Amino acid sequence: MATDDLRQLRAVLREAVRALRIPVRDWERRLGIGNGNLDKLLDGTLELRVRHIVAFAQLLRVSPGDLLDTGCPDLVRQAEHRVSDWIASAPSRPAHKAEPATSPVLSDELVAAIREAVRQELAGDSGPKKQ
């Protein structure tokens, strides 16, 4: 994954953290990272791993694919195939299941706000690129 894709994905995760307003220590505990490491994970100092994406998805009650789709839109647009094109046993993406009103599901408005925040952050980011 290119550095820009990872920066954009991290920006989406950062916005999700802000949107849910769960204390940082709770995020760190639920992600299985040490205290003080959430910022490092989100700024690229620590490597973002699949287990982190899965944990974020569980906390947000969305699919990991939804996080990746939102965080890596350029890669999604560039894709020519789906996994099911290559692997017959790969499940098709299930239809979106309605969640109870109290669950922190990313609404279309929140996704749009996250995307806009990511665009603004990327446009204004002139610092060194981290992976």
Image (spheres, rainbow, N blue to C red):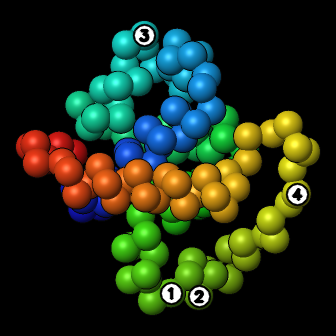
Question: From the viewer's perspective, is residue 117 above or below residue 35?
Answer: below
On the rendered structure, is 86 left or right of 3?
Answer: right
Q: For the residue carrying disc 2, how many other residues have a C-alpha within 10 Å: few (<14), some (14-19), or many (20+)?
A: few
In the rendered structure, find residue 56 and report the number of the disc placed on it: none
- Rendered residue at 45%/20% (across/down): 33
What percent of the width, then of the height, locates residue 21? Answer: 60, 26
Q: Which residue is mark 4?
A: 98
Q: Which residue is mark 3?
A: 35
Which one is nearer the viewer's eye here, 120 or 79?
A: 120
What percent of the width, then of the height, locates residue 82? Answer: 56, 82
Label whose residue precedes the other's in the sequence (2 or 3): 3
Question: From the viewer's perspective, is residue 48 above or below residue 26?
Answer: below
Amino acid under disc 1? His
Q: Secondary structure at mark 3?
A: loop
Q: Which residue is mark 2?
A: 85
Q: Secondary structure at mark 4?
A: loop
